[in-house]
Amino acid sequence: MNTGLILIDIQNDYFAGGRMELVGMEEAGEKAGELLGIFRQKGWPTFHIQHISAQEGATFFLPGTEGAQIHECIQPQDSELVIRKHYPNSFRETSLLQELERHDIKKLVLCGAMSHMCVDATTRAAFDHCFDCAVIQDACATRDLEFNENTIAAKDVHGAFMAALGMAYAQVVSLDKYRELAE
């Protein structure tokens, strides 16, 4: 059974100095880079997802900006496909499903940003397309959110979304645990 890696929106605007800096993105990017190294070593298919903002009034991932570029921690190699998207769900109006089918992939490993948006939407969609999914939780990042005049800390946002995904949609594990499983 073929396994593919989906690296979701690991782009400059989410890192320090970017237009939408996330909590813990440096650490998540480092883990994503290590995960990518595992896939490259095994010769397994890798798909980089790059969000390009298309909606009016967008403030980050703007077309043609440095912030929209894929971060150096996971810089794609020539043989690795980059799929551009305009929505949180990486499958919506992209070639991702066709590419996964073309590579006969049945299992997906996912990581990236933001935990509560694009990672969540893409993982749920992958499950709905009958993929066996694993989310590498420490290779994901998010930000503080506001709700009913309360600030919800990024660690709590991340924890809530990982817990929800782990209930039915994916096996949610750390990079260290995934290394054990991939052996």
Image: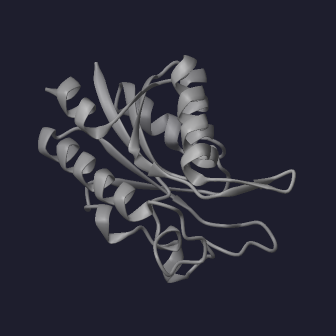
Task: State the residue lying farthest toward the right.
Answer: 148
Q: In which quarter of the image is residue 57?
A: bottom right
The residue at the point 46 percent across, 73 percent down is 12
Q: Quadrant of residue 38?
A: top left
Q: In which quarter of the image is the N terminus?
A: top left
Q: In which quarter of the image is residue 137?
A: top left
The residue at the point 60 percent across, 58 percent down is 143
The residue at the point 70 percent across, 75 percent down is 59
In this rendering, would 87 be left or right of 129?
right
Query: 107 or 80, which is in the foreground?
Result: 107
Image x and y of residue 55, in percent: 77, 66
Image x and y of residue 68, in percent: 53, 73
Query: 36 or 50, which is in the foreground?
Result: 36
Query: 117 or 48, which is in the foreground?
Result: 117
Q: Quadrant of the C terminus?
A: top left
Image x and y of residue 84, in percent: 54, 58
Establish if 78 lies above or below 49.
below
Residue 129 shows in the view: no
In this rendering, would 145 be left or right of 9?
right
Residue 59 shows in the view: yes
Establish if 23 lies above or below 175.
below
Query: 41 or 175, which is in the foreground?
Result: 175
Count of marks placed on residues:
0
